[in-house]
Amino acid sequence: MLNRGIALVNRRNTLLFLQRIGFLAMLLGVVVLGATRAYAGEGGGSRYLPGFLDTMSGVLQPPGWYADLKVISYSATTSRAAMSGQPTLDLRLHDAIEIGLVRQVTDYRLWGSYYAWEVLLPWETPHLEGRTNGVLQFNERTSAEDDLILVPLLLGWHYGDSHQRAQFVIYTNWGNYNVNRILNTGRNSWALEADYAFTYYNLHNGWEVSVAPGYTVNFINPATHYLSGQELHVDYTVLQHFSPTAGAGLAGYYFQQTTGDSGAGAIFGPFKGRTEALGPILSYTIRNGNTPITLVGKYYSEFAVRNRFAGHSFWFVVRLPI
C-alpha cells in the first residue's frame, strides 16, 4: 500500500513537471512565431534592459501586492547607430532611468502556480551628443515616459532550495516618440518576450545562484521601416547571504542579437549587436514595522561589445510588499 502511494505521488509530480515544461515550451513558441516580422537594435540598444533581473529572480512571492522601484544611471559611447532613421556617428550617452513596477500575485492557481501579473512604468532622461572628427554636431536632452511594459502572465514554482519563474512580456509603443527628433524615449514599436528564471538558494550556507534567460522579438517601427534580429539575453547573480538581511556577490549579463537587421531603415546592414557585463552587487533588507524592504545596489561594466552602446551603469533598487 505504501509503495502504491509513493508511486502515485511520483506520478503526480512527474505530470506537474511535464505540464510546466510544456508551458515553458508554449511560451517560447508564442514569441518565436512572431519572428517573421521582427526587428531589434535600432538606436544601438534593445527593448530588454540587460541586467534587469538579479538576486532571487526565480522566486515568486506568496499572494499579495508588491512594488519595485529601479533607479539607473548609464553612461556609454558607440561609434555609430541609426537614430530615428538617421545615421549618427561618435555618440556619447548619459541616461537616467526610473522604472516603477507593480505586481499582484493572486490566489488563483494555474499549472501548479499562483497566477500573477505586473505592470512596469519607465521614465527616462537621456542626454545624447554626436560628434564628427571631434567636432560637436548635435547635443540633445529630453525627459519623458518610456514605453509601458505589460506582463499579463507570470508563474512560479518551488522545490526546496530551487525556485523557478516564467513570464510573458508585452512591450507597448506608448512611450514618447517623434521621428523628427534624433533622441526619443519611446521606440514606436511593439515587442514580445518570454523569460525564465531559476534560483538556487541554500538556507544553510547562504549561497544563492540565480540565472534568468529570455528571448525578445521586436516588431517594425512604421516611421523608420527598421527591421532587425531577435535578441537573446541572460542575467545572472552569485550571492553570499551573510545573514537573512545582508548579502554580497557578483552580477552580470550576456546579450546577443541572434539574427541580423533588414528593411529600408537598416542603413548599416545586419548590424548584429552583442554585449557582456560584470560587477558587484549588494543586498540588504530592513523592516518598517512588519514590512520588509529590500535594498539592492549594483554596478555593471560592459565588455566584448559590438554594434551597441558600451559603458557602465549604477543601479539602486527598492522592493517591498504593499
Image: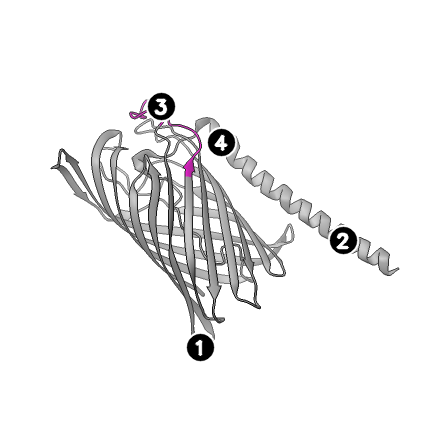
Residue at 63% x, 44% y: name it.
21
Q: Which residue is mark 2?
A: 10
Q: Main secondary structure of the magenta part?
A: loop
Q: Which quadrant would residue 181 be assigned to in this image?
A: top left
In percent of width and height, residue 319 lies at: 42, 63
Label 4 element class: helix
Q: Is residue 198 left or right of residue 69?
A: right
- Check disc 1 and give the amino acid type: Gly
Q: Which residue is mark 4?
A: 34
Label 1 element class: loop
Give the mark nearest the N terminus, 2 or 4. 2
Mark 1 vs 4: CB contact within 8 A = no
For marks 1 and 3, give the CA distance.
56 Å
- Check disc 3 and give the amino acid type: Gly
Q: Which residue is mark 3?
A: 263
- Check disc 2 and give the amino acid type: Asn
What colouring style does the render use?
one colour
Q: Which residue is mark 1?
A: 289
Label 2 element class: helix
Residue at 59% x, 43% y: name it.
24
Please give the range of residues in magenta: 256-270
